[in-house]
């Protein structure tokens, strides 16, 4: 009798152990699947953001980083093909996407300063004659924030074009930059620019002289 009860207890303990083991395996797999899902989402956001920055700002990641991104996408595809995300694979992909994002952000920071600093300097130069100075400050601050990229980036030209220069904003900005650098001439006073100067009561702020 005691032996039978002992045998039954051992069997019950084995069943409990198998259930616990199965439960732990499920939880572990759910954790791996969640990590992989986050990796895929970050991959998508990262690739989309870099593509947009290439078209809007001409930002291009290095060949080395590009190779790592392609490798990451291939590893993700291979993991899906196997039908089961192993813990080692999930951890590797998570670490790899972190390192790639870090590399891209550093390359972006270097590139952004070359592009944005010139824009910010130009805005500060024309601030004194811009129709709405608060918009110039807003645009400058917005552009500065772009250095801390979270893979969501406004178009710099769209920001600058919202300064209140109207449909002829690009032409006016070119003219104002020439004025600021002392390179503007009578030939630069097109009818559109002259009308803009009159509409904003700025004709008295400009002086004409011989070089």
Image (spheres, helix red, strand yellow):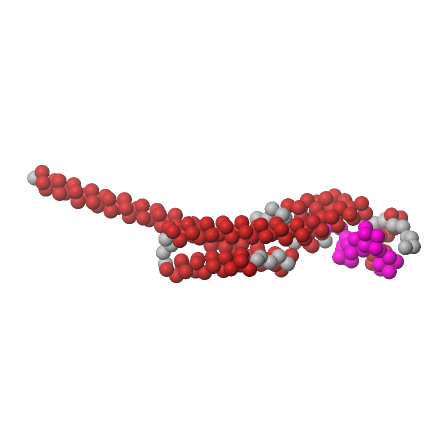
Q: Residue at x 44, y 53 (%)?
A: 93
Total residue callouts? 0
Q: Residue at x 48, y 52 (%)?
A: 97
Q: At which x and y percent is residue 140?
A: 70, 46
Q: Main secondary structure of the magenta part?
A: helix
Which residue is the extreme one toward the top?
2
Q: Residue 77 lies in what quarter of the image?
A: bottom left
The answer to if 173 sits in the magenta stretch is yes
Which residue is the extreme one toward the front?
64
Q: Is residue 57 left or right of residue 88?
A: right
The answer to if 91 sits in the magenta stretch is no
Q: At which x and y percent is residue 186?
A: 88, 58
Q: Is residue 176 left or right of residue 6?
A: right
Q: Quadrant of the N terminus?
A: top left
Which residue is the extreme one toward the left?
1
- Residue range in magenta is 162-190
Q: Is residue 37 left or right of residue 152?
A: left
- Between 61 and 54, the one lying in front of the other is 61
Please say whether residue 132 is visible from this viewpoint. no
Q: Residue at x 74, y 43 (%)?
A: 134
Q: Residue at x 63, y 47 (%)?
A: 147
Which residue is the extreme one toward the right?
210
Q: Quadrant of the C terminus?
A: bottom right
Q: At which x and y percent is residue 143?
A: 67, 48
- Between 77 and 26, the one lying in front of the other is 77
Q: At which x and y percent is residue 167?
A: 76, 57
Q: Is residue 121 left or right of residue 146?
A: right
Please say whether residue 82 is visible from this viewpoint. yes
């Amino acid at each position: 009798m005691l032996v039978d009860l002992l045998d039954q207890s051992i069997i019950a303990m084995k069943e409990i152990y198998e259930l616990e083991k199965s439960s732990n395996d499920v939880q572990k797999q759910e954790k791996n699947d969640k990590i992989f899902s986050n990796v895929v989402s970050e991959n998508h956001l990262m690739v989309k953001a870099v593509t947009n920055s290439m078209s809007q700002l001409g930002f291009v990641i290095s060949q080395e980083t590009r190779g790592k991104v392609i490798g990451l996408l291939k590893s993700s595809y291979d993991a899906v093909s196997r039908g089961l995300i192993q813990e080692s694979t999930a951890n590797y992909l998570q670490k790899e996407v972190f390192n790639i994002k870090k590399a891209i952000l550093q390359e972006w920071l270097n590139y952004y300063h070359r592009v944005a600093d010139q824009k910010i300097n130009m805005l500060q130069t024309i601030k004194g004659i811009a129709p709405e100075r608060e918009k110039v400050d807003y645009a400058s601050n917005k552009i500065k924030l772009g250095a801390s990229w979270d893979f969501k980036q406004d178009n710099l030209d769209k920001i600058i074009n919202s300064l209140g220069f109207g449909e002829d904003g690009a032409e006016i900005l070119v003219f104002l930059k020439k004025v600021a650098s002392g390179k503007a001439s009578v030939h630069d006073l097109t009818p559109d620019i002259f009308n803009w100067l009159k509409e904003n009561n700025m004709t008295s702020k400009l002086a004409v002289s011989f070089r």
